[in-house]
Image (tube, rainbow, N blue to C red):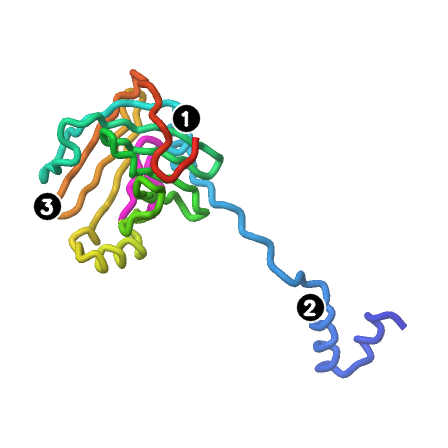
Amino acid sequence: MNKNTLIKKLPKTCAITVAFAGALSTTPAFANEAPLVSIASQDAFFANIKAHCGQAFAGKVTVDNAPASSFSNKALIMHVRKCTDTELQVPFHVGDDSSRTWIISKTGSGLSLKHDHRHTDGSSDVSTMYGGQTLDAGYPQVQSFPADQYSKQLFVELQIPQSMGNTWQMYIYPEVFTYRLVRQGREFRVDFDLTKPVDTPDAPWGYED
């Protein structure tokens, strides 16, 4: 007697139980992983930066309403140093200070921007890996990264709660790449000339060539 004939002969409630058990027996033990979400504008933005992989560019501060001495009269160099299909590593050198690396990643729910800060020995600074996650599709030329929960918690612990309102923005056009930080009462912006590549700097602190 086959299974279908058996189910027909069983009381209704038993037949349902047997059918349900049969369905369970064919269900995989684990669900398949969800595919990465592909948003055309974010993919284009990522690709626009990746197109400059291996190149470095000089920049200058164009807006700073609370000037920091660490950026005064120093060479500012961004280096699109390492690129994969899901991550871009872009060190930001300030004079001899090679402590900063921007990490732009595809997360499956958008784009992430993190700031990896290191000491000269390669160890992580206490203020590191802060950043944000895109909340909308943005544009091929512009993406915004409001501070994420990790960053807000870090800023509270570091006693700089005003930074909880940070939004980082990146713009890329054929002639210029822009890094911008904004929050209430604060704006900082650096523009990099993409038309004139410069010599690539050494690896940032904590990274290998």
Task: Check the picture and name the quadrant holding the C terminus.
Answer: top left
Q: Which residue is mark 3?
A: 185
Stretch in magenta: 132-146
Q: Which numbered marker is on residue 53?
A: 1
Residue 134, located in which quarter of the rendered image? top left
Q: Which residue is mark 2?
A: 24
- Residue 117: image location, x then y, percent: 30, 43
Amino acid type, residue under disc 1 in the picture: Cys
Q: Is residue 98 magenta?
A: no
The residue located at (42%, 48%) in the rendering is 109
Left-right relation of 125 to 20: left
Q: How far is disc 3 from disc 1 in space, using C-alphas?
A: 34 Å
Amino acid type, residue under disc 3 in the picture: Gly
209 or 55: nearer the viewer: 209
- Residue 122: image location, x then y, percent: 36, 42
Is there a contact, CB below 8 Å, between mark 2 and mark 3?
no
Give the class, few, some or many, for how many residues have Cα within 10 Å of label 1's Cα (few <14, many ≥20).
some
Give the class, few, some or many, for how many residues have Cα within 10 Å of label 3's Cα (few <14, many ≥20).
few
